[in-house]
Amino acid sequence: MTKQNKYYNLNIKLNNITKKSSKPDLYDATKNLERKRAPIFFGPYKPEEYINAYKYNQPQKLKLTKNQLKEAYKYIQLYKEDPEARLITIDKKIWIYKIIGEIKYESTDETIQKKDNQILKIVPKYYDVEIIEERETADAPYILASMKANPAFCRNTFRMIDEKKYGGNIAAIKYLINELNDFKIDPLKTLSSVQLETLVVKIFEKNGAFIPAWRGGTLKDIDIIAEFEENIPDNLLIQKIKEKKIKIQVKLQLNEKKKVEDLKKSLASDNFFLITAEDEPHKDLKEYYEKNYLTSKWIKKQIYNYDEIKKWYEECIKWLPTQNRKETVFK
């Protein structure tokens, strides 16, 4: 079996610093990767200082949060722990690369002034890298092109891309660098959250629903509001309801315990529907399954009920080779 590499996301550009920096190129992803180097910052310290602070659980010593220290430590240790790792940075372009050699650092004459008026010298910690693939963002599979907007990645500097949660992202990276090999994934899982919501909207509109808008709303736990002028078609929902306006939450996966608890309260309402791309219902929400809680089984049935939607879906997943598609068999 082909060895499976691990994949990591690295955000290089620091918008809060570059606006007032005398050396904005120092923080710019494009400028750094053109020089074939990938830096992190996290303060004016040397690599060994982060290692020691992490070892003794002393983030306050470097004036960092626990999460910041953990990210810095994991990055500094990357060559020792996973020298064959693949990294991705998304900015004006998408770069996929691997590190070369151990971590380096260099002091510069660049400084930042913190809120307490403390002046700190900038010490970038960086790896020399080998660029494996460079691609215009718009030319990449949409799940990667939209990845920088995903809170899981945009809020962190350095993060491993967990295959269980983000298999679609990994499949797209593997595709771009010709490393798909025997990797298989359900193509539905290669849709981004925006694409999945778009798909659900298309399904409901095809069934006669009026949807004024979706995405960017301010309603908590509601992604889509669908209103029917007539009765809801019998072949759309398993549970028949009298309501003609329904509220829909769309999720790729259910991971957070608090989110599940919030959904449990919402699902008690007859006109609230949860639709996920998962194959099996969450163990804590099974009582609502196939009533107002629908999964990939329902989504796929709807896709192949309508040629227009099927054509759109096939266009979204056309980048994924047929031999790498793992279709789920439902009982």
Image (cartoon, rainbow, N blue to C red):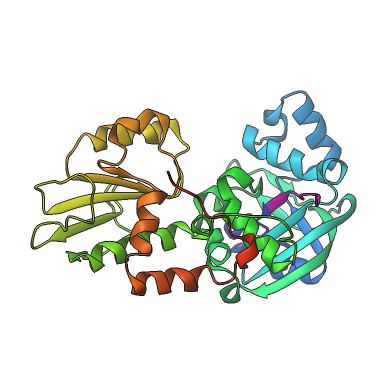
Farthest-out residue, front: 331
Looking at the magenta stretch, what is its main secondary structure?
loop
The x, y position of residue 191, in whole percent, is 49, 60
Q: Quadrant of residue 28?
A: bottom right
- Please give the range of residues in magenta: 1-8
User: Residue placed at 38% from the left, 47% from the top?
Assistant: 295
Farthest-out residue, right: 101
Q: Is residue 147 left or right of residue 212?
A: right
Residue 282 visible in rendering: yes
Looking at the picture, does residue 63 appear above or below residue 240?
A: above
User: Residue placed at 84% from the left, 51% from the top?
Assistant: 84
Question: Which corner quadrant holds the C terminus?
Answer: top left
The x, y position of residue 314, in whole percent, is 48, 71
Asked if residue 6 is among those painted magenta in the image, a careful observer would answer: yes
The x, y position of residue 122, in whole percent, is 76, 52
User: Residue placed at 55% from the left, 72% from the top?
Assistant: 318
Asked if residue 251 is among those painted magenta in the image, a careful observer would answer: no
